[in-house]
Image (cartoon, helix red, strand yellow):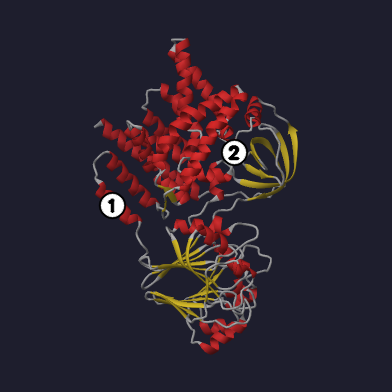
Amino acid sequence: MEKRYLIVLKIILLFSVLYITYYRINNKKYIENNKTSIIGIVRSVKDNKIVINNYQVISKDKININIGSTIKVNGRVKKPSSNTNFNLFNYKNYLLSKKIDYLFYADSIKIIKNSNSFKNKFINYVNSINNPILSTLILGDNRIDEDEYEKIKTNGISHLFAISGMHISFISLTLLLILNKISKRKKLNYLIVSSILIFYAYLTTMSASIIRSVLLFVLMVTKFKTIDLLFYLFLMFLIYNPFYIYDLGFLYSFVNSFFLLYFKPDSLLKTSIIAFLSTFPITVNSTNQVNILSPFLNLFYVPFITYIIFPLCFIVLLIPKLNFILNFFIGILNYSNKIFYKYKLIFIFKTLSPLLIIFYYILLILYLKRKLNYMFYLTFILLYFRFNIYPVVNILDVGQGDSALIELPFFQGNIMIDTGGSQYSDINKYVITPFLKSRGIKKIDYLILTHGDYDHMGASYELIKSYNVGKIIINSYEDNELERKLKNVYHFNKNTLKINNYTFYFLNTANRDENEDSLIIYTKLNNYKFLFMGDASVNNEEYLLNTYNLNNIDFLKVGHHGSNTSSSKKFIDAIKPNNSLISVGKNNFYGHPSKEILNNLKNSNIYRTDINGGIEIVLYNKKYQIKTCVS
């Protein structure tokens, strides 16, 4: 009876803290901040970024300042931005999980008081050995080459390169073994090791996973069970900073530790599988892909890194001349990592909703307790891989450019209209590919490029190289330099494209110039009328009015980003759009959309990617739902 009572109390406590966490996150307020100078103590330094107080200072050049130094920075403050497309990386929440509220772009940095603490000397000494793996494993500061680390992540072994329970356990057990051989005073030995671990945590980045691991060891002297300590630490972390919920290290560390402590696997294989299953939702919602081979790869990498690479890092710290031995084993690590990456078995998974994550963990716990059979996992799979029952249209925020994704129901097809393109950012890498994965889309059946301007098709090259793209359709105008780079394209000069029961009408296939020859696409999705105007001009609009009977358009993808070269009052009054969708960059050089065009569209509901971010339209049978990423 008492046990049940405690379980109920824990559940109430858990949900109370989670509710408070949710409330604090959703009610986070930024105070008006127009500071031009800040003074503070340096918390961390990496390349051209330093953290002081609750600011991340960004410099044009690499910064060489010691941690603990007091500095004065002149520049301008800026509130960090959230993601403007659904399911993508939220930079603001990431910074808040590190207790950083503002960005500060530095014009000048002045050292008021220089610090030369032991921590600085230790960090400089570790980095002077010039071994990225050693710096990563000893300091918790990832310095591994970006391409190499991408392979590590894909192979599902990135957790081995973040200081966590496994590393702290190795250090503590090794130290205890040595001390217990020297002295039989076990309590004193425990206190000595605890002190060493706390000091070691101070020397590192002091990430959530490091602090969790050290505190768990230190508090084991109490009468609480280890799993109870983990539970209370979890609550304490969230009370201290609710935005830890967005810290992947925090989530991986606590979730993985809970399942391993609760189910106590008795073999490395079981440990690896439970670790894989318990962190599956975290991996899915952070990368939207999983390497199914990763539990088996960990059978090799866990002992290899834990008992060879990690101990060698400490030996090299003491005797740097032995770095060549460490590099020999790192060579084996890199070579095997490359081979396994080549033969990876990747599955793309749609982003999981909070409700589905809860359902998954309930099923997983019941299954591991042997109260469910495999058929119950089939239930989750059927729920998770639910197909779209209704058509879904997404207007992506690609800055000053155009990109729309149409998902037909029941896996009938995915059509992308334009990809956007930027000279300053890799739109495919940071927007299109992550978004496609978050929707569980494995193939673009038709890529329609309305015309050859860079802001409409610039990202198409990288998309085609990195993703499964079926037919590529471009307009009938002569190829420009951008279009000639594409291969296996289909010059479209027909009037219709039929996909099962859905027909896409191409209303403009003349041959004049790029903008005048923009593919204009009309379609009905669940009887809702869509008109995608590309960069078509008022001349095209006049042609449409004289040739077709277009009226009461439900969704108008506004032409040329709201430029006054299109969307004439005559055209808008004739087609009477109910909703106007404008794809446009924030504070763009061209001044799009123009006030004149906004006035022409005033009788419709106007959605703009520069204000609303990504736009999702779900088309039910008798109604539709519009959601915007930025409220």
Q: Secondary structure at mark 2?
A: loop
Q: Quadrant of residue 323?
A: top right
Q: Which mark is residue 396?
A: none
Q: Residue at x 62, y 51 (%)?
A: 79
Quadrant in which the N terminus is drawn: top left
* Residue 300 seen in the figure: yes
Identify which amino acid the numbered label 1 is placed on.
Answer: Leu
Residue at 64 percent across and 78 percent down: it is 565
Q: Position of residue 467 (x, y in %)?
A: 49, 59
Residue 76, position as x, y percentages in the image: 70, 49
Residue lying furthest bottom: 546
Q: Residues within 10 Å of mark 2 (few under 14, many from 20)?
A: some
Apparent side of residue 178 relative to residue 326 in the rendered image (left or right)? left
Residue 187: x and y, percent?
44, 15
As helix, strand or loop, the secondary structure at mark 1 comes to helix
* Residue indicated by mark 2: 143
The label number, if any, that marks residue 378 in the structure image: 1
Q: Position of residue 39 (x, y in %)?
A: 70, 38
Compare residues 127 and 557 and report the one nearer the observer.
Answer: 127
